[in-house]
Amino acid sequence: MKILLVEDDPTLGDAVMRAVQQAGFGVDWARDGVQADHALDAYVYDAMLLDLGLPRREGLEVLQRLRRRGMSLPVMILTARDSVEARVRGLDAGADDYLLKPFSHDEMLARLRALLRRAHGVADPDIRVGRLRFDTVTRAASIGERTLTLSARETEVLEILLSQAGRVTAKEAIADRLTGWDEGVGENAVEVYIHRLRRKLEGSGANIRTLRGLGYLLEGER
């Protein structure tokens, strides 16, 4: 899954980016509000971590513009503004969560995972399809008692498909969510990851179907 971090403080931004990457997420880092707007127009994200005190365009305006475009992207505000009024304004503008600086990276990551689960209608941290179980906290996949050995990219693709289980996910959408500003993941690479996952999911009761011209569908055996 891919996260947009919007933070102008280089030290804090670097620390948050590293923490989110180490948790297994892809991260793009925008340093101001205008850059954040451009990123939201150009890429697909699963969540946004948003500072309020940004140069060029305030974080609250970025959030308001996002919601006016009808985007339901989960947003967590990260800010030092600790007044009740500031929290109310942020939540009323469309934020899903509000975390005060300084904060624990563990708490931030736990809240981020909770936002992502709610966004996909999942209350339990475990996603199950057939005998396949995916732990959204540890990002480990298993079939019964057997833990699957997956590469980082395979894990990302599986998580994307599981978050859309029972619905079609376009190949282009998968490639986009795997791609950061400084790297590229082509659609041919997505096909390779899907092929590897199919082999590793054998016997799980979870199948990845190709719907030609549409994309991929992960579903349980009928």
Image (tube, rainbow, N blue to C red):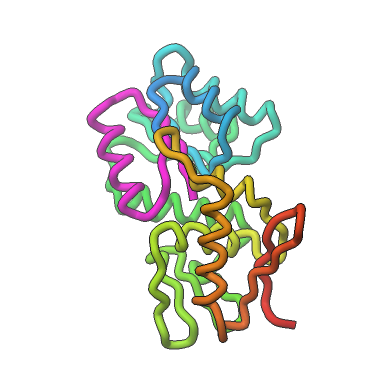
- Residue displayed at 41% across by 50% down: 25
- Residue displayed at 46% across by 27% down: 86
Q: Is residue 166 above or below residue 51?
A: below
Image quarter (top left, top right, bottom left or bottom right) of the C terminus: bottom right
- Looking at the image, the residue that sits furthest to the left is 11
Viewer-nearest residue: 92 or 146: 146
- Looking at the image, the residue that sits furthest to the top is 56
- Looking at the image, the residue that sits furthest to the front is 188
Q: Give the tally of numbered discs.
A: 0
Viewer-nearest residue: 124 or 176: 176
Viewer-nearest residue: 117 or 202: 202
In the displayed structure, does residue 222 sit left or right of residue 105? right
Residue 153 is situated, as x and y percent measured from the top left of the image, at 44, 57
- Residue displayed at 46% across by 62% down: 154
Verify whether residue 40 appears in magenta.
no
Q: Quadrant location of residue 17?
A: top left
Verify whether residue 8 appears in magenta.
yes
Q: Is residue 187 above or below residue 220?
A: above
Residue 188 is situated, as x and y percent measured from the top left of the image, at 56, 52
Viewer-nearest residue: 212 or 131: 212
Q: Quadrant location of residue 206?
A: bottom right
The stretch of residues the image draws in magenta is: 1-28
Q: Is residue 47 above or below residue 13?
A: below
- Residue displayed at 45% across by 62% down: 155
Residue 72 is situated, as x and y percent measured from the top left of the image, at 64, 40
